[in-house]
């Protein structure tokens, strides 16, 4: 197939890499210097659904896979479908599951999908008055898309009030915070559960675990994700079955019943509480950096499965996923997740062995690759066990260097504590 991958980060590099490994001709818009090694990159002056459609027409794409959420929420799938172009992802209405936290919470409440107790507010005064009805810590969420920066876990009333002010004033995440959800905080471990969905059928990918905080031991502010690993043992067979039936399939049934059938990657961000799994949030796309770890375990059938789901015949596809475990460690720029410095020269990429480096925030300057974003690289490896995968990844990180490079040394440690290998 001629496949167009929309996006330019580590997730899109992994998607392009996997599709190319399966023998397809891959194009990426806009792509990045790492992706250019496996796909043709199409530079874009604007990243609108219309521009992506022009690219798909130009290359006569048989299938388009959309990486990030913004084009989905902007209606790229509706536009492609109206022009007869095959594209994998939800239509604009269904993408609200990620585009509006208020929509997704009310949807879960309507359909009995387990999630934390919540209330939705359109004014600072009402939200502030309601804080007394929630115990501390309390979770405050911006309704709209906020690139991972729209959730605050406040440990004190003062922190909660300051966060509400920051959200409603627009200081924290702009217009995305003009509506706010306050919800109960649940303790537990987070798990990313992602399924390839075809309106009423779902093919679950192996479970994975992200590491959102910038520092080790989950300390410091949240990021887009500092690393992830995938290991089937993150969930028991019984837990997987329960989540598939009570979260993923129930969501598909609910969306279909409300006239918004869902096709695409459905990502349930779960908190595994003492009271069972609760949905923290939905995403309507693959996770980043979960994708890098997940696709590294695949041994075939990824692109064919996506095409089958796009054509409404998911049952006919065979996705081959290898045993063992995989992991991705993100190397981030100085200052991330705050204001980052760009333009630092990245050295040592040619010396990496035993793993693959997916590019996220990089740029080519002559014959050098330099930093050009917060999350710069995702070093990704695989092994027979989680320990072997982590050894491969951290060994591969060693030769890579750039000024101010920061990364977590404890990716996968929660998994290692559970099963020692
Ligand atoms: N890694 C979290 C996300 O993709 O939203």
Image (cartoon, helix red, strand yellow):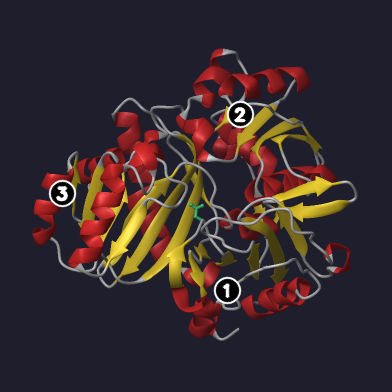
Structural distance between the alpha carbons of marks 2 and 3:
35 Å
Quarter of the image where the C terminus is located: bottom right
Can you tell which mark lies on residue 47?
Answer: 2
Quarter of the image where the N terminus is located: top right
Q: Which residue is mark 1?
A: 411
**Picture residue at 77% right of the left edge, 22% below the top:** 59
Q: Position of residue 83 (x, y in %)?
A: 59, 13
**Picture residue at 33% right of the left edge, 44% below the top:** 250
Mark 3, Cα crowd under 10 Å, few <14 / some 14-19 / many 20+, is: many
**Picture residue at 27% right of the left edge, 41% below the top:** 102
Q: Nearer the viewer, mark 1 or mark 3?
A: 3
- Return the disc, 1 or 3, that comes first in the chain's sequence: 3
Dot 1: element? loop
Q: Position of residue 260 (x, y in %)?
A: 36, 28
For residue 277, above or below residue 51: below
Q: Which residue is mark 3?
A: 127
Left or right: residue 51 compared with residue 237: right
């Amino acid at each position: 197939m001629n496949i167009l991958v929309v996006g330019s980060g580590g997730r899109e590099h992994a998607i392009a890499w996997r599709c190319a490994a399966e023998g397809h001709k891959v194009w990426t818009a806009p792509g990045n210097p790492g992706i250019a090694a496996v796909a043709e990159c199409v530079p874009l002056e604007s990243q609108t659904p219309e521009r992506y459609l022009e690219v798909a027409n130009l290359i006569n794409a048989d299938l388009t896979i959309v990486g990030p959420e913004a084009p989905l929420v902007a209606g790229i799938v509706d536009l492609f479908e109206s022009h007869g172009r095959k594209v994998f992802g939800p239509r604009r209405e269904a993408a609200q599951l990620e585009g509006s936290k208020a929509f997704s919470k009310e949807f879960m409440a309507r359909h009995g999908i387990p999630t934390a107790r919540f209330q939705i507010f359109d004014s600072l005064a009402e939200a502030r008055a309601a804080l007394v009805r929630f115990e501390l810590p309390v979770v405050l969420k911006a309704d709209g898309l906020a690139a991972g920066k729209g959730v605050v876990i406040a440990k004190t009333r003062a922190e909660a009030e300051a966060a509400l002010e920051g959200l409603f004033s627009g200081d924290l995440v702009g217009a995305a915070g003009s509506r706010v959800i306050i919800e109960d905080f649940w303790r537990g471990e987070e798990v990313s559960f992602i399924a390839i969905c075809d309106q009423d059928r779902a093919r679950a990918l192996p479970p994975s675990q992200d590491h959102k905080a910038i520092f080790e031991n989950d300390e410091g502010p949240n990021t887009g994700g500092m690393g992830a690993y995938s290991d089937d043992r993150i969930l028991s067979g019984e837990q997987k079955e329960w989540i598939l039936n009570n979260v993923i399939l129930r969501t598909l049934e609910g969306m279909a019943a409300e006239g918004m059938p869902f096709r695409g990657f459905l990502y349930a961000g779960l908190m595994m509480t003492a009271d069972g799994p609760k949905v923290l949030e939905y995403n309507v796309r693959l996770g980043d950096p979960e994708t890098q770890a997940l696709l590294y375990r695949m041994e075939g059938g990824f692109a064919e499965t996506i095409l089958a789901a796009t054509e409404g015949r998911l049952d006919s596809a065979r996705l081959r996923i290898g045993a063992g475990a995989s992991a991705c460690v993100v190397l981030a720029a100085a200052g991330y997740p705050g204001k980052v410095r760009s333009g630092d020269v990245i050295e040592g990429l040619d010396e990496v062995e035993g793993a693959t480096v997916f590019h996220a925030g990089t740029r080519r300057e002559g014959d050098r690759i330099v930093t050009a974003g917060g999350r710069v690289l995702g070093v990704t490896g695989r092994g027979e066990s989680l320990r072997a995968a982590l050894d491969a990844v951290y060994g591969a990180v060693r030769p890579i260097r750039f000024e101010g490079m920061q990364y977590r040394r404890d990716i996968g440690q929660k998994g290692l504590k559970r099963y020692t290998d």
